[in-house]
Amino acid sequence: MTGVLTYILTFDRLPELDRSGRPKMFYKHRIHDKCYRRPFFDAGKFVERWDDEGARNGWCLFKMGCRGPTTYNSCSTFQWNNGVSFPIRSGHGCIGCSEAGFWDNDSFYDRLSNIPLPGVQSGAETVGKVLAAAAGIGVAAHLASFGVKAALEKSKSAKTGEEA
């Protein structure tokens, strides 16, 4: 709130807002994009249980229910109260408290199944269905090309046979 008031007093206008009406200066990036555990996500290293090797080594908390991939907030930048109030730094996944329906999004420990991919406005399930359909179309086109090729060869041999 102090940041927004300072912005208004400094620039004599409201800050730019995101699609949910929140100030973009605080809600522009996903927690996931600036998380210090992100390299572990990219490497496929996840905490599987709260007391496993991954937990002890600070691996990604996605499989433990972290909502960082779907939450837009500045927690990973500010790390409130010297990091003590930043769940990920405390060893707990982001709970998505700044997102719509926060209280109604099941348990904090349920793994999210529909994660939007960077640069894509669809979840992994939708992208998978589209890719499977594209592969099916590719296979059908390949089979059709064999039929066209066979028809051309038959036509060519028929013409060669007629001319002889």
Image (tube, helix red, strand yellow):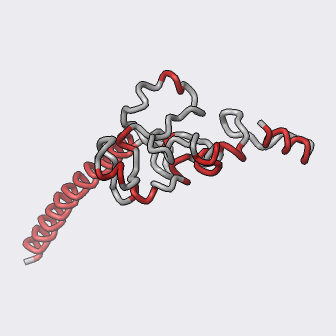
Is 102 rendered above or below residue 142? above
Residue 121: percent from left, percent from top? 50, 44
Q: Position of residue 59 (x, y in %)?
A: 38, 53
Q: Is residue 130 left or right of residue 139?
A: right
The quarter of the picture where residue 146 lies is bottom left
- Horizontally, residue 12 falls left or right of residue 162, namely right
Residue 129, position in %: x, y? Answer: 33, 42
**Position of the C terminus by quadrant:** bottom left
Q: Nearer the viewer, residue 66 or 145?
A: 66
Horizontal relation, residue 28 to residue 45: left or right:
right
| Any part of residue 74 in sight | no
Percent coordinates x, y for residue 103 in the rendering: 52, 23
Is residue 129 visible from the viewing direction of this image? yes
Residue displayed at 57% across by 28% down: 100
In the displayed structure, 103 sits above or below 7; it is above
Residue in the picture at 59% in, 42% down: 72
- Furthest residue in direction bottom, as rendered: 164
Q: Nearer the viewer, residue 49 or 69?
A: 49
Q: Is residue 33 above or below residue 92?
A: below
- Quadrant of the rendering where the N terminus is positioned: top right
Residue drawn 92% across and 43% down? Answer: 12
